[in-house]
Amino acid sequence: MGQFKRDISGTNTDYAKTKNDTYADNLETEVLIVGAGFGGIYLMHKLRQLGFRCKIYEAGKNIGGIWHWNCYPGARVDSQIPIYEYSMPEVWKDWTWSCRYPGYEELRKYFDHVDKVLDVRKDVAFQTRVVGAQFDKPSAKWVIKTEDGRTAKAKYFLLATGFAAKRHFPDWMGMDKFKGEIHHSSFWPEGVDVKGKHIAVVGTGSTGVQIAQETSKDAASVTVFQRTPNLALPMQQKPITEDEQIKRKDQYAEAFKYRMTTFCGFQYDFVDRNTFDDTPEVREAFYEERFRLGGFEFWLANYKDLLFDSDANREAYNFWAKKTRARISDPVKRDILAPLEPPHPFGTKRPSLEQNYYEMLDRPENEVVDINMTPIIEFTEIGIKTEDGKHREFNVIALATGFDAVTGGMKNMGLKDVDGIELSEKWKIGTWSYLGMTCAGFPNMFFLYGAHGPTAFSNGPSCIECQGDWIVDAMKKLKDEDIKYIDATRQAEEEWHRKYMSANIPGKPREQLNYAGGIPLYEKECREVLENGFQGFITA
């Protein structure tokens, strides 16, 4: 089971640990950021501009966050360019993409470009994993411990670990027995050969959809083990020339400004009418146009009552099912992949984007196994056994079983509150935060793109810039007003908690972990806290 045993820091270029103070033991810095992806880099750049001294601790060997780790077959972004990039002109003015939805290789090149413009890497300690952190009240500083024994102290501790930082491994019996190749999607090594091989894909989240779709091109067979159907939408991928993008550059500033006014931070928004305001004929044509345009338009540029009215939601699902079922000739696969009855209300889980997922799985050599009806019993040396007595043989098994999403990364870092209680313990019976950026008992600690923010219901960079700007402005206010630290109150946490699915982790409380009111309302509520003198916080 070699992939679980390999160095989890990744397979990219190994940046040697330089002799600068970024890697120093007993490091003293004003701001310590965890994570060198979209969020961490944005925070560091904005804080540097205000004169803050910043360092980043990054577990991997390169910048890019999820795009450093993701190199599984078909790994690709689901937000259309230029919406999926930084809004900073100094970054976008000299950068162009090859297509509407870039893959991981191109996104890594983008982060190389970001580094050239913003000079990121000199202040990043790579292969540095945080295993403990606690705020020391007498010194008003965070004391942070790393896996290799180093210590750092910082006035501000910022977590930019992302919502999918802790991988989820199922506990099926015999997983360590399998003699072929077995890889979690987030540990996927470069150069896995699937040509002519029998592939198992366990899981049908966005990762599972992408791996199954991509490996089906060359594999002898692909078997997908599905618990919940993915209500995937057509991506409508297409190339975009450099000239096309250069001609549009004068519209970028307005496009980035507009994305922050939309519900989920995309380049489009819900239309200002309800589903049944239109005749059936007009509604059908409207739905067809959303499918033709592709991406998340059928989800987020649909009728405004889609997510709020059950009949409207069912109408949209019925259209999705009709369009999708027409693409699948096998009746058994059709009912598993696109059932007539919705597995959950459409759009309440983020759909995946696909290019030819349904056509690929419809091929006779490929199989879809509904593990609700025929559960996985065990892994063997040569394959997977299911409850119906079948023993399927595989050369490669892809575990697309997802992550302990939204909260997993923060709970896995040894974070302790001022009384020494671990965050993982405090969040055992539910997740608590204030504004989706702070936690009671953790002074001067901020996080973004995590629990109780717009996170999974948003375009990543839009959410990050919304929350990042608030954190930066809060820190500037603290500095200007000579406040040593702020700490959210428990009452503020409870009120925020009341405003609000973590279904893939056994034993984890089922709760709404994402702010569902949209980015504009979220930003308004957070800004009011600053305008009212850190309402909901204790200051010292």
Image (cartoon, rainbow, N blue to C red):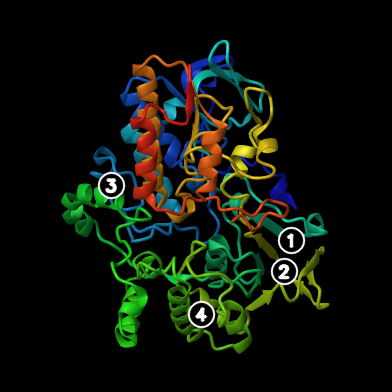
Q: Give the CA distance from mark 2 to mark 1.
A: 7 Å
**Mark closest to the chain's N terminus, 2 or 1:** 1
Instruction: Say what amino acid the circle numbered 4 marks.
Output: Glu
The residue singled out by tag 3 in the image is 95
| Residue 194 point in image, percent of width and height | 61, 65
Tag 2 secondary structure: loop
Q: Give the CA distance from mark 1 to mark 4.
A: 27 Å
Indicate whether 470 appears above or below 67: above
Instruction: Say what amino acid the circle numbered 3 marks.
Output: Trp
Indicate whether 323 appears above or below 384: below
**Mark closest to the chain's N terminus, 1 or 3:** 3
Instruction: Say what amino acid the circle numbered 1 marks.
Output: Gly
The residue singled out by tag 1 in the image is 180
Tag 1 secondary structure: loop
Is the residue under label 3 in contact with that under label 1 (CB below 8 Å)? no
The residue singled out by tag 2 in the image is 394
Tag 4 secondary structure: helix
Q: Give the CA distance from mark 4 to mark 3.
A: 34 Å
Mark 4 surroundings within 10 Å by alpha-carbon count, few (fewer than 14), some (14 through 19), many (20 or more): some
Is the residue under label 3 in contact with that under label 4 (CB below 8 Å)? no
Mark 2 surroundings within 10 Å by alpha-carbon count, few (fewer than 14), some (14 through 19), many (20 or more): many
The residue singled out by tag 4 in the image is 359
* Residue drawn at point x = 68 percent, y = 54 percent: 505
* Residue drawn at point x = 38 percent, y = 64 percent: 300
Is the residue under label 1 in contact with that under label 2 (CB below 8 Å)? yes
**Mark closest to the chain's N terminus, 2 or 4:** 4
